[in-house]
Image: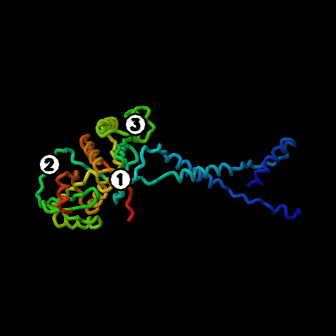
Amino acid sequence: MPRIKPKRHGVLIDMTPLVDVAFLLLTFFMLTTSFKPPEEVTIDLPTSNSVIKLPSSNVITLSLSNDGRIFMDVDSQKLRGRLFGKENENKAGVEVSKDKLGEYLMQARTSNPRLVTVIKGDKGAEFGIAQDVMDVLQKARITRFNLLTNLENN
Amino acid sequence: MSGGGGDAPQPRSHGKKKHKKGKRLGIRIDMTPLVDVAFLLLTFFMLTTSMSRPQTMEINLPPDETAKVEIAESNLITLRINEKGDVYWNIGMDAPVKIEWTKLRGFIRERSVANTKLVTLIKIDPKAKYEVMVNIMDELNQADMQRFSIARLNDQDKKILESVKG
């Protein structure tokens, strides 16, 4: 028995570098993740072959649901609070009527002129509503906007 | 790991009682639970993060909605899309002809090569799906047709399409 004893060493692996890397990645993912509040409507995007990426900030999103409602959202919480009131500050979009949309867009653009407008339409939404929204955009002098799509896989 | 963790406190208490006898052993803290939690969080954040930003299609509207462009009839190709999403094309005042979605891209490309002044007017039924609009814009972009206008399909257009079917 005494002979065997000194040979029995537990294998110790130095885990420090592993842990370092793990924590580095952890902090990275924690800082880059931004949790979205639950969306007001689920939107099934159409597909296209366009490869332009959506800017990550300064975006006004106009969601068109397939039952014909329009939701407007801005990505800054502060601006959202100012536009739609404190109670809607943490919502992901507020339903707006076609007539009020232009007014909201103007307000948003005056407080932040760099805002990019994005239309996020559901596949099944009616073209008429999209056209109405585009008319409003043109009236509000937003002549440059994006349509959100998924990449077409073929 | 567990062996190392268990050994650590013993020499320390030993040393205190018998004063200078204790060897200087490095303090080993069992980091296993910490690492477990770290990896758990890491996997969680990795799985919930979506790295890819969605694609967008960029549209530029003319700044003035009253802007009017005069085009010769022969240079205007009209694509009419009905409620069901069928595409009909015609040049000038010709009768509309139905075309399959799959053939559209090649057809537009062919036409724009044949006549470089060609202007496209897309008329879509307001009841048609939004997807149809995105698809047709995508087809035109793919066919290098960057300039086009989009309008609603009015009653007159509907009648024209009816007459083709009948």
Task: Kindly identify which chain the residue marked by label 3 belongs to.
Answer: A
Q: Earlier in the sequence, mark 1 or mark 3?
A: 3
Name the secondary structure under disc 3. helix
The picture places residue A131, in percent across and down from the top left corner, at: 27, 48
Q: Considering depth in this image, is A137 or A108 the residue closer to the camera?
A: A137
Amino acid carrying label 2: it is Lys
Q: Are marks 1 and 2 in contact (CB under 8 Å)?
A: no
- The kind of residue on which mark 1 rests is Gly
Instruction: Give residue A99's position: percent from left, percent from top.
Output: 28, 38
Q: Nearer the viewer, residue A8 or B105?
A: B105
Which type of secondary structure does the marked residue at label 2 adopt?
loop
Disc 3 packing (10 Å; few <14; some 14–19; many ≥20):
many
Q: Is residue A144 left or right of residue A90?
A: left
* Corner quadrant of residue A69: top left
B140 above or below A30? below
Frontmost of labels 1 and 3 is 1
What's the CA distance linking mark 1 and mark 2? 32 Å
Task: Point out residue A150 in the picture as x, y percentages from the top left corner.
Answer: 38, 56
The one of A114 and B69 positioned closer to us in this rendering: B69
Q: Nearer the viewer, residue B163 or B70?
A: B163
Instruction: Report which residue position mark 3 lands on.
Output: A80
**How many numbered marks appear?**
3
Residue A106 - label:
none
Q: Which residue is mark 2?
A: B68
Tell me which amino acid carries mark 3: Arg
On-image quarter of the N terminus of chain B = bottom right
